[in-house]
Amino acid sequence: MDNQVNITYITLEGYVEVHKYRYLYFVIMFTAYILILCSNSTVVYLIWIHPNLHEPMYIFVAALLINSVVYSTVFYPKLLIDFLSDKQIISYSACLFQWFIFYSLACSEFLLLAAMAYDRYVSICKPLQYPTIMRKNTVIMFLVLAWLVPVCQVAVPIVQNVNKKLCKFIFKGIICNSTVYKLHCVESKVLNIYGLIVFVNLVLLPVLFILFTYTRIFIITYRSCGEVRRKAAQTCLPHLIVLINFSCLSAYDALLLRVEIDFPKTVRFIMSLQLLVYHPLFNPIIYGLKMKEIYKHLKRLFCKM
């Protein structure tokens, strides 16, 4: 292999016994990909065609599910090719693109969950002002910010790393994330500090805002009648479950990057598959089964079929 190929390509060393179980891995992941596309697209389709679901809460749910479809479509084709290939390699530019999509969509998810928390707060705590505050333009602004802000902030380290020289060509993973910086000859302290700032802006602050908002909702509903408490729990519980699930998976990535814990290869592989399979499938199931209006339309759809 000549120097140009050594510089351009990275070996993905995160796979566990891929030569032995390649066809099993392929079938499982291909099935998961089809399920992710079908489940997420079905819920988005129902939200789109039914006028009673054209409310801010359901629009934010649709945005989350679209994120899952985009995320899966970026990672799964490469993953499926790797399972059937003799060598699991990726070009450095494609690796940076995966890094960009991974963090842009992850941060977007936290911002969308924060927008949903605010929507629930206004709906439950300020019901008379809800139509005035959560107008169409406000929802569009939240959606644009939730997608655009992460893209702009995550793009900075990607652009800075494009021309970085690599001294290592073996990556301990199956999808590229910010641990790619460990392959660089010289580690940039400025980019590390910038990454920490982005983490605070796009992850920590939204999570704190969500926790504060739901705490306020629970305090107010606790003082209200049983019917109000039931409705609040019915609409807020799915969002909290998704938040906890996604936060736990994100914590693994943070531990991998900042604390630099050297997880065993099998643990890394299983956690990577969790990120790829579990979360994109988890969202449509939770929102489809736990949100009454969506579940009602899903039931009608399957009854017709």
Image (cartoon, helix red, strand yellow):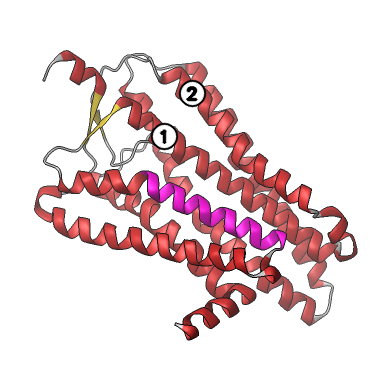
> With 81 as the anchor, is 53 left or right in this view?
right
What percent of the width, then of the height, locates residue 93?
34, 26
Q: Quadrant of residue 116?
A: bottom right
Marks 1 and 2 sit apart, C-alpha to C-alpha, by 10 Å
Residue nearest the observer in this picture, 60 or 44: 44
SS assignment at label 2: helix
Residue 157's disc is 2
> With 30 as the anchor, is 244 left or right in this view?
right
What percent of the width, then of the height, locates residue 154?
52, 30
Label 1, on which residue? 99
- Residue at the image point whose x is 77% and y is 63% from the top: 217
- Residue at the image point whose x is 89% and y is 59% from the top: 129
Q: Quadrant of the N terminus?
A: top left
> With 42 as the anchor, is 115 left or right in this view?
right
> With 56 as the anchor, is 296 left or right in this view?
left
Residue 139 lies in the magenta stretch: no
Can you name the residue that lies furthest to the bottom here?
303
Q: Give amino acid for label 2.
A: Pro
- Residue at the image point whose x is 44% and y is 40% from the top: 102
What percent of the width, then of the height, locates residue 173?
29, 39
Residue 259 is at least partly visible in this image: yes
Highlighted range, magenta:
55-74
- Residue at the image point whose x is 59% and y is 29% from the top: 197
Q: Quadrant of residue 184?
A: top left
Can you name the residue that lies furthest to the right here?
128
Q: Give amino acid for label 1.
A: Trp
Q: Main secondary structure of the magenta part?
A: helix
Is 162 rendered above or below residue 62? Answer: above
